[in-house]
Amino acid sequence: MLKTAIGAALVAVAGLGATAQADLIVTEIMFNSSSPETPGVDNWEYVEIYNNGSTTVDLTGWVFDDSAGTQFTAANIASGSIAPGTFAVLYDSAAQDLAEMQGAWGAGINFIGVSTWSNLNNSNGDRIGLWASLADYGAARDFSTAQVDQPYTDLAPWPTDNGSASFTLRGLDLDGSLGENWALSELGDMFGTYQSTAFGSNNGQDIGNPGTIPAPGALALAAVGGLVAGRWRR
């Protein structure tokens, strides 16, 4: 589902993603799943966040949003935390419950529900933010105070969206604001990508890797091993 186009402006800000103030890194974005994408009804979008710091980050009372759509008036993460060196997968808890997410992607993943999910743009780009409080989020959705500020688009040098696979950060030590540091998730790639299981409204055709983390220097290591195929070169 496509929101009001904001393409050119978001391409322009694609280099403005801030380094996570709380050592949080976006490592995967499922913005255009093959399964339904209707917030609050059926919505299989998700965003994976990695804690690159040395202390646990408690997301209770935080705000997750993107740059389009109606601004929120209340925090939308009721509970959940990310321990150092681990990840969380944020999802639309008004549309899918925990059992459905686990049924589609597997148990043991740190899923954290977002009660009001703003649908992510499928084309023309978007900008994802994560704020530590409603006060930080502010009356104007202030990205300068966000703990995470992550832009994306499907225009080169970013990967090309195929309508079923997520975008994956190629390495934890890479700058996530640069499109060349992202890859389209593919079965058999170096990121442990796998296919969802048909469960509930999930059609079993989504391609992603929630539950796996790209290692520091993953792209360089793959190049040394001769695993970087032409599809990585953009």
Image: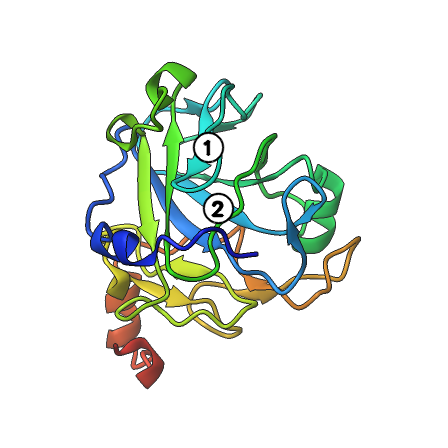
Quadrant occupied by the N terminus: bottom right
**What residue lies at 76% left-to-right and 55% top-to-bottom?**
201
Q: Position of residue 128 (x, y in %)?
A: 39, 42
Label placed on residue 47:
2
Q: Amino acid at mark 1?
A: Phe
Q: Position of residue 182 (x, y in %)?
A: 33, 62
Q: Is residue 124 above or below residue 59?
A: below
Q: How many marks?
A: 2
**What residue lies at 47% left-to-right and 39% top-to-bottom?**
69
CA–CA distance in space, label 1 to label 2: 10 Å
Furthest residue toward right: 200
For marks 1 and 2, the one nearer the N-term is 2
Label 2: element kind: strand
Label 1: element kind: strand
Q: Is residue 222 above or below residue 119?
A: below
Q: Is residue 192 above or below residue 150?
A: below
Q: Is residue 26 above or below residue 166?
A: above
**What residue lies at 50% left-to-right and 55% top-to-bottom?**
31
Quadrant occupied by the C terminus: bottom left
Q: Amino acid at mark 2?
A: Val
Q: How is the image coloured?
A: rainbow
Residue occupied by mark 1? 64
Badge 1 crowding class, 10 Å Cα cut-off, few under 14, some 14 to 19, many 20 or more, is many
Looking at this view, is 199 or 171 the one in front? 199
Furthest residue toward front: 4
Contact (Cβ within 8 Å) of mark 1 with mark 2: yes
